[in-house]
Image (cartoon, coloured by chain):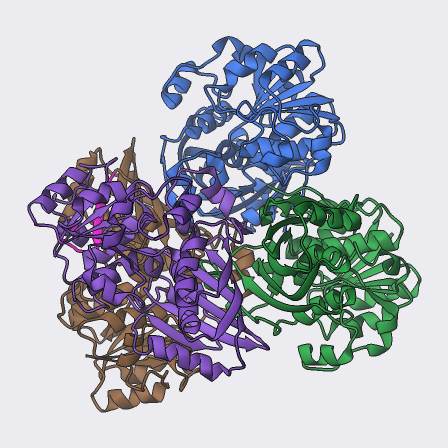
Chain colours: A brown, B blue, C green, D purple
């Protein structure tokens, strides 16, 4: 297989290069960086393995979009990942649709309701014409759609971490009312942007909530999938930033719709996730971000408190929350082993 | 004034020494460390200012409990702070009651219901006989009691950060039902304990919830004060740890009991906190821990989301959440300016 | 006294506002930010104490350079601190010279040799005409000059931390040859700049040397002062970055010019620093950055290894390495107690 | 191959399990923890991949030393790694010698001079009788010895990072006199010990030198290998701690023995390291710990300053500095591809 990566020098792109570089089925990589095309990739990112550079079609150099387009035009490209910013990604990906499978990590193909998109992003959905060809790439829930899609919209990190523990219970009708979800994210979730607010000195020794309730752009994305499972549910979602590089935990409180035991909850999870390689059901234990650091896993725990259910989930925001799930989507799309090239264990 | 500090080499004790060392009314300090008595304080803690050491009665050396007892016996001690562990603190403080004002930072005098204490701490309340002489030292709410108390039980960090935004609204009847509070704490909140789980390598690059719902020992403490304000409220409280040294934020969701505006909420806060020097009402802005780092402030923000109210609060867990509030309690108890020796600005 | 601060929203400026806000002799502050003039200072920096804002002449708002110029023109300004970038600072400070004491934290008045400046900064010394009116503000060494100067060039953080342990020994002729100094700095030393390389994700879990040997701009500054003390010495200086916000340590190796004891070294230090409030001589103990965090102290330790001497020093790069020393220089210049407004103890 | 790991719950042991779990030739692992034998490994370390647990002979449980001994007795164990503390490791490994290849990560077999060991560790060399069967496992330098050894003493992290840039130059006679090496280590280098000094709150926002000159236990280890290459060299080595979990850089200054160019230095490096997969020669660029995070690489840079040479090296202290080199030694010993199971790229 031959893969291209747009936005190869951002955090998601850097992780994609590492994953594709070790992927057993990917033999050639076009690493696109519009700003640094022509530079040796290992000069820009000295941490890259020589073996990743060896897979690059351009002799280890970063490429331009044109080079990817040329490969796609010659029917030589199987898949193109876009780790470009939203509002920019859809337009740049559009010419590739139909020529290569497009796996987009931006928000441009995630929200099906154009009014919701416009409200969240302050501008119309960039390519409504292509939405029909896209599927929401939450791998454990939309595998059938993924297998046939031209465009896969990789979910946001917060939606992935929040939806995975909720969907089985929403589908089973076990919860009701307003779901209160609070998440903590590592700083890489904000991207590799030259902003004062993301400087080491601002973020170290600091923690805070931001964009609470319904104001974060990921809230409508979570709501879309949650209400698809159970239209009666609503959501208050509050993200927080804490001084770690990678990692995310979500703590969710929901009202139980009837009296259940923790084993009933476990049964609902097993029904949805039994045998799924990247879901780890940890019962009453509360997962930590270090349990999944560098892995594509989502660990899920739960406890009952009277009429409320408490859910705990942990992912690596750059893996299951971005690049890892993107590769998982690729594996599903191309009928490869779903786990190929994806770690299930954590780095120390 | 002459003050003693028990547990002077723990984090709360170290901050107490720094605050009392700069306090304009405190002229002499007995810094007690049972394990290191006789050692020069600046050998044990090289960061201590020479001027703090100069205030120490023992020529800059750490003292034994006996030295504090001797001073108290001779009616030469005004106040004794205990930063000892719970279950140990009450017994060691007991002989000082009536001779010096006891300001206890442990949990031993916080919970008025002995059954609740026994459930939370797994052992009976250590000194129920002394509870009558104690007051819960949440400074903005119990100043009258503090002025007359023999024993002041300094609230826990989580209760302080969670109660300060809630109490004015509970008292005004603006909220109802189950309050969902999620807090993030810096690691110093767990104390200076030689535990694997508190090592740099375990805590750095890690975040997690723990003791969720009603299982953390601070949950009954928050409930006690919350239901005293409005007996119909209940609480689900989940603490989280994140890799910062100092700091705490709480994100709280409560159902509104009637339709209100954000200005109504502001009015309720002004009614309770107008002119209080350590409460900063920041409106719809969400406070960050860095805003209050090293200060005795609690910053409070709020937003309305449909029928729900979202509250955001930030403190320094070792200041307003422990040693700073202890000194504030002392100031109130002795009729000194409430702000004496207490910063209202944050370190960079 | 009335003071102005140029560059009030950078890290050095933020610390200056905090120090001047608590300084007993400073009654009024003009906090200048060209980019945010007119904004309430506490909106821009919510950590600022209300009491600092209350000292601001403009009702707590950030001011323009013009407002500072107007105050200076009316002979109403005693001192102006510049925390502006080098190459920009001298030009903006020039009109104030003679009207207010200028205390410049940039490099523009530090290097006396115009060729050396041009080599280090790649451009001519901006205001050679004003160099005669300036003094190098290493407070423990140039107090006489500081008392009379129109312009005080506050030393860089690396020079301060490296020179303070070296100068007494150089002056006493105890060392010879090439001095090898290695320093580790917290990230705030690089300033509040929107650069990828200073992002949390880049700096956390990372450490590195940079600009080694003679290539860092602070190397000629250290050499200038070192060779003024002993013209036969030369220097190899290598700075390192490590993931802490504030703090600096230097480890220096020098050849002994004759056989000495550690007590001989101690005597040389006492001869230079006996009674100096901000120098702490710690003997064979190796100081840590936490010993001096938030204080204006420099802690100095030393050991003899055969014919070599090893020196260890620690400062807070934003205090003794920048804003703290600037205030110390102001105190000396205006005949105030040298310690006024400056902590000698470390934050926890 | 079947491998056992003693001390499987320390940091080096945890990394060994991860590496062996992914190693293509290792089919079975006995993970020994004397304190937690019988516990499921994934309960103790939830980050472990299920696939690692699946390789464990005991059904995913931690084993006792006896189980490893039984396997060795039955000639069913190929290799045993010891990540036990020094002074304890040699005794526990001794019964395995001759039955399985012993790869010891402690200091017990590193120092060939018994007097030097006794001075550094305060107690006699534990098993001088076995020293003859051991080789110093610096993989790039002792491959021949490693191939035949019964015991491989994996070098310390500081020696690895310091020796790799020095040995080619010492061997080529390019340097002389006293070598000044300064290293910065991540906190995991100190091990998983319940010590106050290793707590998050003590280590975060802190940096310091310790055990300077000749006093660190790794100094004689570096000297042993350095003087074996050139007996005229001597060493002053100072380690530093900085708040990162993993990673190490060394900055070394040495006097040139004759006038050379940077290309001469490059040639000396190529002569020693040409084609070696884990050495990356980066010329005048200064490597950072992030370049090698999680990889088994050592990146080496160099610059000439007059008559001095400056060397810069970076490793991951738990990989090339411990467990990674241990696996590299295993690969060499068993004639497997030297790179098997060892990453050459860095984690993001």
* The quarter of the displayed image where residue B345 is located: top right
Q: Is residue A96 above or below residue B327?
A: below
Q: Position of residue A263 (x, y in %)?
A: 17, 36
Q: Position of residue A270 (x, y in %)?
A: 15, 46
**Quick check: is C74 in the magenta stretch?**
no
Relative side of B110 to A217, left or right: right
Q: Name the residue located 82 percent from the left edge and 78 percent from the top edge.
A: C128
**Magenta range:** A272-283
Q: Report if residue A13 is visible in the image.
A: yes
* The quarter of the displayed image where residue B254 is located: top left
* The quarter of the displayed image where residue D305 is located: bottom right
**Quick check: is A275 in the magenta stretch?**
yes
Q: Which is more toward the observer, B125 or C215?
A: C215
Q: Position of residue C41 (x, y in %)?
A: 70, 55
Q: Position of residue D323 (x, y in %)?
A: 29, 56
Q: Which is more toward the observer, B248 or C172?
A: C172
Q: Report if residue A179 is visible in the image.
A: no
Relative side of C134 to B108, left or right: right
- What is the tally of numbered marks visible in this picture? 0
Q: Is residue D348 above or below residue A162?
A: below
Relative side of C149 to A230, left or right: right
Q: Name the residue located 43 percent from the left edge and 73 percent from the top edge.
A: D169
Which image quadrant: the N terminus of chain A?
bottom left
Q: Which is more toward the observer, A105 or A168?
A: A105
Q: Most extreme residue toward the right, as rendered?
A: C75
């Amino acid at each position: 297989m031959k893969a291209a990566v747009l936005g190869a020098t951002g955090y998601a792109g850097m992780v994609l290069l590492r994953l594709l570089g070790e992927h057993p089925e990917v033999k050639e990589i076009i690493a696109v960086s519009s700003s640094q095309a022509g530079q040796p990739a290992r000069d820009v990112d000295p941490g890259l393995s020589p073996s990743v550079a060896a897979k690059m079609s351009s002799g280890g150099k970063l490429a331009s979009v044109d080079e990817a387009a040329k490969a796609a035009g010659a029917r030589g490209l199987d898949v193109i990942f876009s780790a470009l910013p939203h509002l920019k990604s859809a337009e740049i990906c559009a010419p590739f649709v139909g020529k290569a499978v497009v796996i987009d990590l931006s928000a441009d193909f995630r929200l099906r309701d154009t009014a919701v998109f416009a409200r969240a992003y302050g501008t119309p959905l960039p390519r409504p014409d292509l939405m029909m060809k896209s599927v929401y790439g939450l791998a454990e829930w939309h595998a059938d759609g993924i297998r046939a899609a031209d465009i896969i919209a990789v979910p946001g990190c917060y939606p992935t971490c929040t939806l995975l523990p909720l969907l089985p219970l929403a589908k089973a009708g076990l919860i009701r009312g307003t779901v209160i979800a609070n998440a903590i994210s590592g700083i890489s979730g904000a991207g590799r942007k030259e902003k004062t607010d993301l400087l080491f000195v601002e973020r170290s020794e600091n923690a805070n909530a931001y964009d609470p309730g319904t104001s974060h752009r990921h809230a409508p994305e979570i709501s879309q999938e949650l209400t698809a499972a159970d239209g009666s549910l609503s959501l208050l979602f509050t993200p927080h930033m804490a001084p770690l590089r990678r990692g995310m935990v979500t703590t969710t409180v929901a009202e139980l719709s009837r009296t259940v035991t923790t084993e009933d909850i476990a049964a609902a999870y097993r029904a949805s996730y039994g045998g799924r390689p990247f879901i780890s059901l940890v019962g009453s234990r509360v997962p930590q971000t270090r349990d999944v650091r560098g892995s594509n896993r989502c660990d899920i725990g739960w406890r009952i408190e009277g009429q409320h259910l408490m859910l705990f989930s942990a992912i690596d925001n750059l893996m299951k929350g971005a690049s890892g799930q993107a590769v998982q989507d690729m594996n599903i799309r191309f009928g490869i082993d779903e786990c190929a090239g994806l770690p299930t264990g954590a780095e120390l």
